[in-house]
Image (spheres, rainbow, N blue to C red):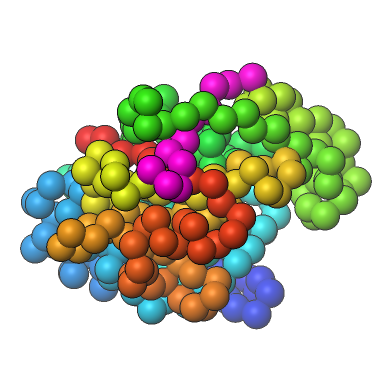
Amino acid sequence: MKKIIVTIFSMLIFFNAQAQHKIYSDPQDKVIFNRYAEYIKTKKNQPLEKVIIETAKFFLSVPYVANTLEIEPEGVVVNLRGLDCTTFVETVYALSYTAKSEDLSFENFTRHLMRIRYRGDVISDYSDRLHYTSDWVFENEKKGIVKSIVHTPAWEPIKHKFFVMSTNHEKYKQLKGNPALTEKIKAVETELNGRDHFYLPTEKIEQNKNLIKSGDVVAFVTTKIPGIDMTHMGIIYKEGGMLTFIHASSSHKKVVLNREPLAVYAKGTGRNVGVIIARPQL
């Protein structure tokens, strides 16, 4: 392993020959992972959804940090020191599946993280990352990691138009000046545009909360921001009779347990029309 300086912190970069991808991590990430392994070892025999909640709680108050994945060349970025809404969900799920396995090691965790975050088993470039939440759920359902929850008639069809990345390529450092890579992203968007999508409208969340379980992934659907499908995501948490969620919050600047019901949060954002739900599978 070779230590180099990346932005403002020291990071270890190593190459996994078997998986054919780079892994970026700071030495402190292994320290945190080892602390997590000690924390979870007496809880890991619980059902998966409970392990997910215990893992999510482990990260309460960890700082919200955006754009931690934007390192080139593309590889698996491990950052347990700062999380955004997506990396929080991915990290919690990867750690939880690692805890439920027979191999509670940092290396196994990175394998689970890569499998959740990327389309295939090899990372060739930026287009392999699952950038759109709908695609994230679709691909992870194919892998048997989650199952998309749709109960009609409460869940309604919705037509998304995906284009924000390809039409704003100059705003993404990986796409800027790279028309070939932009075309790959556009091809992904075209495929997404051809899929069927369903969501649970905000006004129907509370009356259907018995269909949603602790440990589920929740993502917030928007129709008000052109070119994307979701604005935020987190992990469902049921406390007493209240349905809420745990998430990395940009407004609170840390991972928090939301203190208001999920339906109240969804309505209060002013830009979301409902949610999608994905359930962990083991």
Q: 75 or 100, which is in the foreground?
A: 100
Q: 122 or 16, which is in the foreground?
A: 122
Q: 149 or 139, which is in the foreground?
A: 149
117 in magenta: no
Q: Residue 265's image quarter? A: bottom left
Q: Is residue 183 left or right of residue 191?
A: right
Q: Is residue 154 left or right of residue 192?
A: left
Q: Residue drawn at (65%, 80%), measured in percent from left and top?
A: 8
Q: 208 or 188, which is in the foreground?
A: 208
Q: Is residue 261 left or right of residue 172?
A: left
Q: Is residue 231 left or right of residue 39?
A: right
Q: Residue drawn at (20%, 63%), measured in percent from left and top?
A: 239
- How far across and down, in percent of the image, does residue 203 sit? 42, 47
- Residue range of the region highlighted in magenta in the rendering: 194-204
Q: Residue 262's image quarter? A: bottom left
Q: Residue drawn at (55%, 62%), measured in percent from left and top?
A: 269
Where 3 sits versus 205, above or below?
below
- How far across and down, in percent of the image, does residue 108 sit? 33, 48
Tell me if I can see residue 142 in this picture.
yes
Can you name the residue that lies furthest to the right here?
Answer: 177
Q: Residue drawn at (68%, 74%), measured in percent from left and top?
A: 7
Tell me if I can see residue 91 in this picture.
no
- How far across and down, in percent of the image, does residue 204 sit? 38, 43
Where 46 sits versus 199, above or below?
below
- How far across and down, in percent of the image, does residue 126 sit? 68, 43
- Figure quadrant of the C terminus: top left
Q: Residue 65's image quarter? A: bottom right
Q: How many marks?
A: 0
197 in magenta: yes
